Amino acid sequence: MIRRETMDATRAAMIGSIAFTVILVGAVLWDEHAPPPIADNAQEIADFCLGDHSNIGVHYHPMLEIVINEQQVSIPANTGINHDGCSMRGVHTHDSTGKIHVEMDKKYNVPIESFFIVWGETFNENQILDYVVDEDHEIIVTLDGERVYTYEDTVVDDQEVLRIEYREK
């Protein structure tokens, strides 16, 4: 009887170890191959008026880099500050470094389009600012160095670097 209980315990430990390994490998693979998060409504996020800092649920800082024909574009300071009757939009800048402040009442999947709406500029797969894709030019978008094809729907999170480059093909 003791021998059978030992075998049952050993078998249970092996099955548990195998199950744990399968779950761990699955989690790692999912993390590397998971689809990008689905963006929340860009216009609703752009319209969010923070007002002051009393109703902040989240506060984080993605970085935006725009390069046009090998020239870095400065992101304007105070974009979204004192904007259309709102003292501070939930997506805004304080300086021209490209650091975007996302300060919202709760966590959203904030697409970069929200910032462009607040800024009053255009970004999509065919255009960045006043530059339009044609037979000689393309737009390349990377998130933390990895190419993405979600363009304006790219969801940005804390400390991520979104680079938008308009260049010759």
Image (cartoon, rainbow, N blue to C red):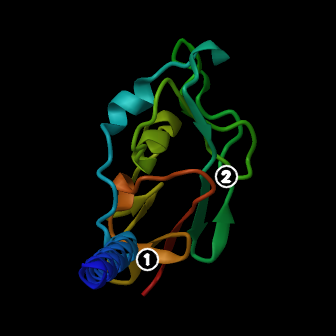
Image quarter where the N terminus lies is bottom left
Answer yes or no: is residue 124 visible: no
Residue at 24% in and 82% down: 4
12 to the left or right of 83: left
Image quarter where the C terminus lies is bottom left
> Which residue was labeled with disc 2?
98
Asked if the residue at tag 2 contacts the one at tag 1, i.e. Cβ–Cβ closer than 8 Å, the answer is no
Quadrant of the image occupied by residue 51: top right
Q: Horizontal and vertical percent for residue 167?
A: 49, 78
Residue at 42% in and 53% down: 155
Residue at 57% in and 16% down: 55
In three-dimensional space, the C-alpha distance between marks 1 and 2, rounded to whole angstroms, equals 19 Å
Q: Amino acid at mark 2?
A: Gly
> Which residue was labeled with disc 1?
147
Residue at 47% in and 44% down: 116
Q: Horizontal and vertical percent for residue 91?
A: 54, 35
Q: Few, some or many C-alpha atoms within 10 Å of disc 1 (few <14, some 14-19, many ≥20)?
A: few
Vertical position of residue 4 compared to residue 144: above or below: below
Answer yes or no: is residue 14 visible: yes
Q: Which mark is residue 18?
A: none
Numbered-mark total: 2
Vertical position of residue 79 compared to residue 131: above or below: above
46 to the left or right of 41: right
Nearest to the eye among marks 1 and 2: give it: 1
Q: Amino acid at mark 1?
A: Arg
Q: Nearer the viewer, residue 119 or 18?
A: 18
Quadrant of the image occupied by residue 21: bottom left
Which of the marked residues, 1 or 2, is nearer the chain's N terminus? 2
Q: Horizontal and vertical percent for residue 38?
A: 29, 51
Q: Nearer the viewer, residue 141 or 138?
A: 141
